[in-house]
Amino acid sequence: TKVEELLENVPLPDGETHTKNVFLKDKKHGLFLVSVKADSDINTKALGKALKLQGKVNLRLANEEILLSSLGVKTGCVGPMCIMNNTAKDVTLVLDERLFEDEIKKVHSHPL
């Protein structure tokens, strides 16, 4: 995947991390821009529970049309900074708490 290629080709020193970013949708709960440490797995069922989403939760990758209209970027260019393009303010930004651990001094992510 792109994240594994990034980790292999752009190694970082201790205290720095890359991010893995996904744009998810759910009919009932809306749109979510999720940014986690690059070595994380994204379990959508666990994510729904962590976000305390009520009722049926069916988080799925949003298609590129929704990505473009909501965040103004194409697939492969998603990062947490994209949230500033969400003028409708209908996307929830979700940041992995592991990005804020004491040993993490710098986070590298897609610039837009």
Image (tube, rainbow, N blue to C red):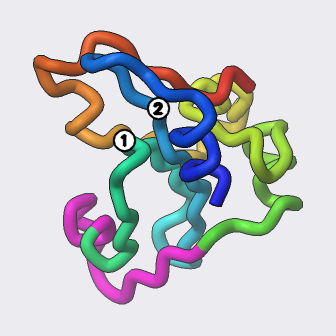
The span picked out in magenta is 47-60
Relative to 93, is 32 above or below? below
Separation of residues labelled 1 and 2 (CA atoms): 6 Å
Percent of width and height locating residue 107? 41, 20
Q: Residue at x 31, y 65 (%)?
A: 47
Residue 104 in which image quadrant: top left
Viewer-nearest residue: 31 or 76: 76
Marker count (numbered): 2
Residue 52 magenta-drawn?
yes
* Residue indicated by mark 1: 37
Verify CB contact (< 8 Å) between mark 1 and mark 2. yes
Relative to 78, is 54 above or below? below
Q: Mainly helix, strand or loop, the magenta region?
A: loop
Percent of width and height locating residue 83? 61, 31
Amino acid marked by disc 2: His
Q: Residue at x 26, y 17 (%)?
A: 15
Q: Residue at x 79, y 52 (%)?
A: 75
Q: Residue at x 52, y 54 (%)?
A: 32
Crowding at label 1, few (<14), some or many (≥20) Cα neighbours within 10 Å?
many
Residue 18: give its label: 2
Percent of width and height locating residue 43? 35, 72
Relative to 94, is 46 above or below? below
Quadrant that contains the C terminus: top right
Residue 16: give its label: none
**Residue positioned most to the bottom:** 56
Viewer-nearest residue: 5 or 22: 5
Amino acid marked by disc 1: Lys
Query: Is label 2 in a helix, a strand or a loop?
Result: strand
